[in-house]
Image (tube, rainbow, N blue to C red):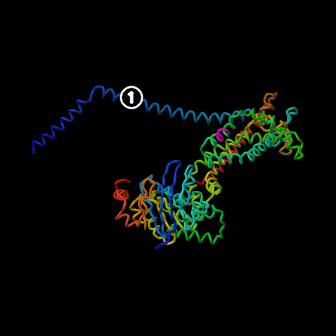
Amino acid sequence: MESTIVSTKGFNAYFGTNHVVKDVNIDIPQNNVVAVMGPSGCGKTTFLRCINRMHELIPGATANGTIMLHNENVYDMHPIFVRLKIGMVFQRPNPFPNLSIYDNVIAGYKLNGIKLPKEEKDRIVEHSLTKSALWNEVKDALHKKGNFLSGGQQQRLCIARAIAMEPEVLLLDEPTSALDPISTSSIEALLHDLKKNYTLIIVTHNMQQAARVSDRTAFFYLGELVEYDDTKKMFTNPKDTRTQNYITGRFS
Amino acid sequence: MKTSLDNSVVTRRNSVLRVINSIKTSDIVRTSKRIKHSYRQIRTEKIFRRTLIFMGVAMVLLVLGIMLTLIVESVPSIKSLGIGYLWGKVWDPVRDIYGAYPFLLGTLLTSFLALAISVPFSFAVAIVLGEYYPKGWLSNLLKNTVELIAAVPSVIYGFWGLAVLVPIVRSFETKVGVQPVGIGIFSASLILSVMIIPYAASLGRAMIQMVPSQLKEAASALGATRWEVIRSVILPYTKSGLFAGILLSLGRALGETMAVTMVIGNTSLIPKNIFSPGNTMASVIANEFTEADHPVYLSALIELGLVLFLVTVVINMIGKRIIKRYTTV
């Protein structure tokens, strides 16, 4: 049995009085890819942003309940430490436009004021870019700014930036929705490699993507976690009629 | 087979007839009206474009005209005083000696000192309004108050300076052990620094609000604190805009006349330190223009205006260069 790395209990999230995530209980096993899917507005992105406490940065946003990372409640930890342990990749590639590719990868260290010797930085940059399958494409242009990169390359740069901090969990918020099909498939292939070292939670509204990349799938509908199961089981034999309707395309 | 073909021909003819019958004279009138209307549209477009071009050209001509006037009117002074006018240290209209140096120094000194004092406040306001509290009544109150600073007539600042600021500066001068005059370069700089806060603050706020939230989120997700986000994302992203704001403030400080003239002391001596009385170019022109009783005196004052004009132009050009160089995004 795999060990659980993230587990939530009675978790709720709000925007003002709007209850967007309702009483979610979910256990995320280590070194798995867990897909969170559901129609737009179902609270899946909000739930993801709660896990590394990005949700509360929005004015008026609140949350309650517990999210355990190993044996620690992230809502008892300082948000800065939570975000160092739980990395995030956003919907739109957002490398820092004023930094070189190299500096983008180690941006997390720079931002946190961690000074590293040059060899260490070089090692981290190469390691992270290799893991994010970008090294061969950019190794000759490390000190150029990243704006000549394609959308897919920029997204992989963002993944490199996130894993450079050696997080335990990587949250991906619809990481391919702004990308073309070729970039999408390269990112999906990458996710498969990354799960050896990290636990991945990926939000997607694309069912095929959830089926392709994930080990387990959670289906959110109107803020509730409707069903959470093995991806194969979920897609072949959904228990809830709402899941069934969603998978068969009766609503989206 | 044949009948069905006939049928289809008949249907088609009928439908054509129906269309022809449905065209009424009113339709034809309407069409010609539409064409007329189109012509009118094209003509309006032409007039509109010409008006715009005319206005743009008028602006350029106006500025060139002002510059030309200044140059022409300065000719007597340039002829009789030469280039030495710029670094002449004595300004004594009674003995007919005109040197612009004390006022050039006074202008630059007051402006840059004011800038140094005001920039921290401007940036603080810009960051508070742009990043921390972009909305809400408190934010609106602060924003409107700061903008009001720019709307207060400068003569009121002069009064306030004389009544409130000068006594404070005087007691401060007593404490630090310089001659307690109160009025002087330092008081003028303080007044100016207040007056120029809104320019850098407003532009800075607008710039900071324009930083894409996805970049700020990227930094937050990497564990950056609010301050680290401001320092590493917002400030680098907005630096050219912030600099442009500083430039606006500086331009205002260089040209400000009334408030400065009321508290600077109006002496033609070269200021010994920042507490001594002095004068600026704009202030001298305002004070002495009505007293200029012979042509060279008048012309020397106009040349002072020309120098002030050129100083602002040069500083603006340097500033634009810097903005261009640092605009990375």
Label tally: 1
**Would you place residue A82 above or below residue B92 in this image?**
below
Residue B135 point in image, percent of width and height: 59, 44
Q: Identity of the amino acid at label 1?
A: Lys
Residue under label 1, please give it. Answer: B36
Residue B221: percent from left, percent from top: 57, 59
Q: Quadrant of the N terminus of chain B?
A: top left
Q: Position of residue A212 (x, y in %)?
A: 40, 65
Magenta-span inclusion, residue B143? yes
Q: Quadrant of residue A75?
A: bottom right
Q: Is residue B318 visible?
A: no
Q: Quadrant of residue B3?
A: top left
Residue at disc 1, secondary structure: helix
Q: Is residue B3 magenta?
A: no
* Quarter assignment of residue B69: top right
Judging depth in this view, the residue of B114 and B286 nearest the camera is B114
Residue in front for this viewpoint, A13 or A42: A13
| Front-lying residue, B1 or A107 | A107
The residue depicted at 26 percent of the width and 29 percent of the height is B23
Residue B36 visible to an observer of this rendering: yes
* Direction from residue A90 to residue A209 in the image, left or right: left
Give the main secondary structure, helix, strand or loop, of the magenta stretch.
helix
